[in-house]
Image (tube, rainbow, N blue to C red):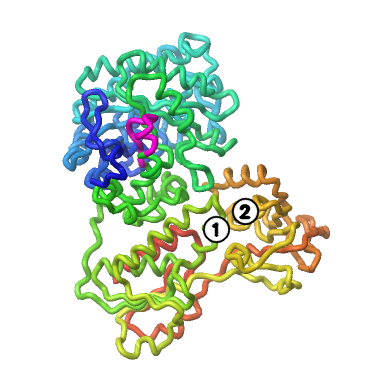
Amino acid sequence: MDKRYEKILEPGLIGNVHIRNRTIWPAMIRNYANLDGSVNKKTIDHFAERSKGGAGLIITGAACISREGRSFPNQLAIDRDEMIVGLANLAEAIKAYGAAACIQLHHTGRQTSSENTGLPVVAPSAIASPGLPVPKELTTEECQALVEAYAQAARRAVIAGFDAVELHAAHGYLVSQFLSPRTNKRTDKYGGDLNGRMTFLMETIRRIREVIGSRIGLIVRLNSEDYLPGGIPFEEGKATAIAVAETGLVDALQISGGTYEQAALNPIPGDSATCMLVPRAHFMRNVAEIKKAVNIPILCSNAMTPELAEEFLEKGELDFVGFGRSMFADSELVNKLRKGQREDIRPCIRCNEFCIGKESITGVRCTVNPECGHEDEGPLRKATPPKRVIIIGGGVAGMEAARVATLRGHKVSLYEKSDKLGGHLHEASVPTFKADLGEIKNWLLRQMDRLHIDVHLNEEFTSDCCRNDKPDTIIVATGSNPLKPHIPGIDGKNVIAGIDLLLGKAEVGENVIVAGGGAVGCETAIWLSEQGKNVTVVEMMPEVVSDSPVTRATVLEMLKRAGVKLSTDTKITAFDEKGISALDKNRNPVRIEGDSIVLAMGMVPNSSLYNSVKDLADDVYVIGDAIHPRRVGDAIHSAYRIASII
């Protein structure tokens, strides 16, 4: 056992449930189930893989306890007895590899639509979630019926063989809606002051415990606060946690925070699924205060690293630590910690693009781990026979292709014309709030060394590279270059490529214009503002950050806090030494002054090499940005797909 992570790897108890270590894989909606909510092979294999990987407690994501409480069409269900057989197979698969199995009981309340449920949306009060329909206010009798629905779902969990159930009372879902003064305006016993608003929660806890007895554990997930005006303040979140613990009926609390409404209106600090722009473990101040006030185990999942987890466990501020998205990125996280292979853990970069941004469309995926969500397809297959593979370009796509092809047994050579691997990840990870991108770059670099891949730096690929050993396959991963449109003055001395600026190859003055309001341009503007520069972002479209819907709200808030000025609907017509000339949306002339101009107007594929190599091997592929510049995950997935079939 790695002594650096002694506390993480120490066994523990939740009620009568033995947990082999202090790690949990917390509940997250995967959207993998069949349309009727039943369990399928994809779901079973996905969870079983994390049990194989060493997780201590696995909490299956949000199983709806009543049809009108569904969040997504393919959400797991525990709302009727027909689901029990599939759920039993799921629990059995998790426990077979040593993890304890828990299922989360969930009702979305107002955070859904009739398109998902086929039924009217219901909530404690007729207050709509932003962008969703006004819900029907539950009658007192309907509230009591839902308490029983939670209890019957718990009964099914017992029959299915789960070790524990978790009641989801956080993140603005139904129970949280009862607790929040913002969403609960009721005048019956379920409303009023905090004690009244806790009634639904307390009745549900009591009824669940009546049904499950002492056989299995009961966990309650609560918000420490909503971070939202009129929502649950920390004082009430703490008081609720204390009241729940004092019932003597609950075995552990999982403490979280934020709601979907909050994430849209005030994305900093955000909910438990923080993006890379937000500090890690920001709930811990609240969690530590709650931990002091209760006498049952506390769980928290909040963008933890193994080092943070060990620190909080050692200080006694936590009892169990969740590695949510981190186990999407690497299912073997716990095993690697145990074996002393910390540096081999594939890092979650907290981009939220594939796991949260696409969960309602494709089900959960992972930017850095293309196997996530495809566990039912099995592991990589060895190539028969192995081939001679040449990869041209050492950016993220080229390195991933080299890694996967080597794992399959191919003999790989990688050519990179610059003096280092990593491509655009170098400049992309320069701002401190984008440092997570540097982690995946460093991980890929370590894989190149670990797998002893034949890397040729400072060597531009030519046909001579094939002279001694004709390749069977060539993969072109030459990436992309900054777009440089034909605008008068663009070659001026004060016009600087954003890449050159971030890499320290150029400097700017005090008043900076960033030409381009996509995610890259806006993040560069924030970085410059942090250095004391006066920054204006100029964007020809009506909105900035439109290319990054998952993190857009957070970036907009950061721009606001940084004091960055935005000029949208503004088309640049000329650059000069004193700034830019442009046209507004009505084609009226606009003048913006600045002593330096930073270009962030997009990227174009660098695919020109393809024509010169297409006849040098039987199979030639183009991957990553060389096809079309997109995000890191698109490059990694593109590379993985090709390398897994050659």
Residue 376: percent from left, percent from top: 25, 52
Magenta segment: 311-323
Mark 2 secondary-structure assignment: helix
Circles 1 and 2, Cβ within 8 Å, touching? The answer is yes
**Which residue sits at x=65%, y=67%?**
506
Q: Earlier in the sequence, mark 1 or mark 2?
A: 1
Q: Nearer the viewer, residue 593 or 616?
A: 593
Residue 624: percent from left, percent from top: 44, 67
Q: Is residue 319 magenta?
A: yes
Answer with the quarter of the image where residue 54 lies.
top left
Residue 137: percent from left, percent from top: 50, 19
Horizontal side of 139 relative to 9 (left or right) equals: right
The amino acid type found where label 1 is placed reads Val
Q: Nearer the viewer, residue 64 or 207?
A: 207
Q: Which quarter of the rendered picture does the C terminus lie within?
A: bottom left
Answer with the quarter of the image where residue 500 lies.
bottom right
Image disc number at residue 278: none
The amino acid type found where label 2 is placed reads Trp
**Which residue sits at x=28%, y=69%?**
406
**Which residue sits at x=52%, y=10%?**
187
Mark 1 secondary-structure assignment: loop
- Is 594 placed above or below 197 here? below
Q: Is residue 282 magenta?
A: no
Specify whether residue 120 is in view: no
Q: Nearer the viewer, residue 564 or 452?
A: 452
- Is 159 placed above or below 639 here? above
Specify whether residue 47 is in view: yes
Q: Nearer the viewer, residue 520 or 511?
A: 511
Q: Which residue is mark 2?
A: 527
**Which residue sits at x=51%, y=42%?**
279
Image disc number at residue 430: 1
Horizontal side of 598 relative to 610 (left or right) equals: right
